[in-house]
Image (spheres, helix red, strand yellow):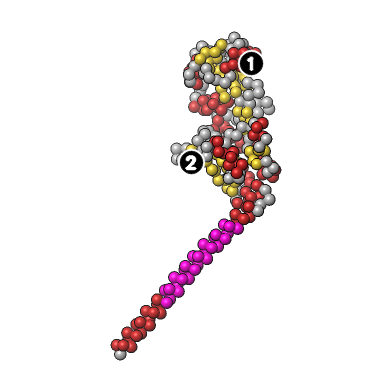
Amino acid sequence: MKKKNILNVLISVATVAALLTGCGSSEKAATETVAEANETTEVKAQTEVAEADDELEAIQKAGKIIVGVEGTYPPFTYHDDDGTLIGYDVEVAQNIAEYLGVEVEFVESDWDSLLAGVDSGRLDTVINDVTVTDERKEKYDFSEPYFFNSRQVVVKKGNPQNIKSLEDLNGKKVAINSTNAYIEELNELGVEIVPIDSSEEQVNMLFAGRTDFSTFNSVILADYLGQHPDAELEVGFVIPDSEEQIAIPVRKGETRLLEQINAALAELKESGKLAEISDKYFHGDYTKSQAE
């Protein structure tokens, strides 16, 4: 009797072990099947992207546009106190991605390697205060400009010296750093140079009446006015031919992608959203050319 019970127990244990082994094998098989399916899906997606006819189709199939930024260049691309990537160009990129119906993936890198990332195909584009130059136009196709940066002659509010053109600078005083690129041009215009060491000193001398005007990059001026909203400053005029156009580069021949980026920018301009973003980060609308 005891032998029979022992035999039954052994049979039961063997049966349970077999069931457990079978269950484990099924779970393992199921896990492997899911992993294989995921891998197959990923490979298929990568293949579809690789086989895309152009960059726009590749972006749409991937479901994302890969945008290069510095992430250390306020107020264009930088991180807030919580570490979140923000900035004028960050929001522009997000809105373009939304227009394209895809997500945006930001890749942060040093400036010197950003355009190289477009060359290699690692990046779809760079949206990080990229100035349009003749040299760059030989290598990339550019969108319509969406930001304009220029050199400005800044005076006290009310423009007491009536400075409205380059000719009006003759005989006037300006406080400027001795290494400034415009020193030679100002000398030729008959301007008296008062050397200074900082932008703060430059502004203080203008307020005190010790100089007649200052020169500022429009972005730097906007940043200053944002931090000092009550500053008694105004733009006398924009220095001719000093305006820089900021646009979005893509690889040569990517016509459809360029058309869609331009369409997105046009919508942002028409709706007023682009000007709103500019005002948020630069305390002014820098989305239109001074010539307009």
Instruction: Please tell me which of labels 1 and 2 falls first in the chain.
Output: 2
Viewer-proximal residue, 120 or 42? 120
Q: Would residue 287 be visible to someone looking at this image? A: no
Mark 1 is surrounded, within 10 Å at the Cα level, by few (under 14), some (14 to 19) or many (20 or more) other residues, namely some
Kindly report the distance in space between the C-alpha atoms of the residues bearing marks 1 and 2. Answer: 43 Å
Amino acid on which disc 2 is placed: Thr
Quadrant containing the C terminus is top right
Position of residue 29 measured from the top left corner of the image (x, y, whole percent): 49, 68
Q: Would residue 129 be visible to someone looking at this image? A: yes
Residue sitting at the far left:
2
- In the image, is residue 41 above or below residue 91? below
Which mark is drawn over residue 166?
1
Q: Is residue 21 magenta?
A: yes
- In the image, is residue 42 above or below residue 148? below
- Give the magenta range: 18-44
Position of residue 27 measured from the top left corner of the image (x, y, whole percent): 47, 68
Mark 2 is surrounded, within 10 Å at the Cα level, by few (under 14), some (14 to 19) or many (20 or more) other residues, namely few
Residue at which label 2 appears: 84
- In the image, is residue 38 above or below residue 24? above
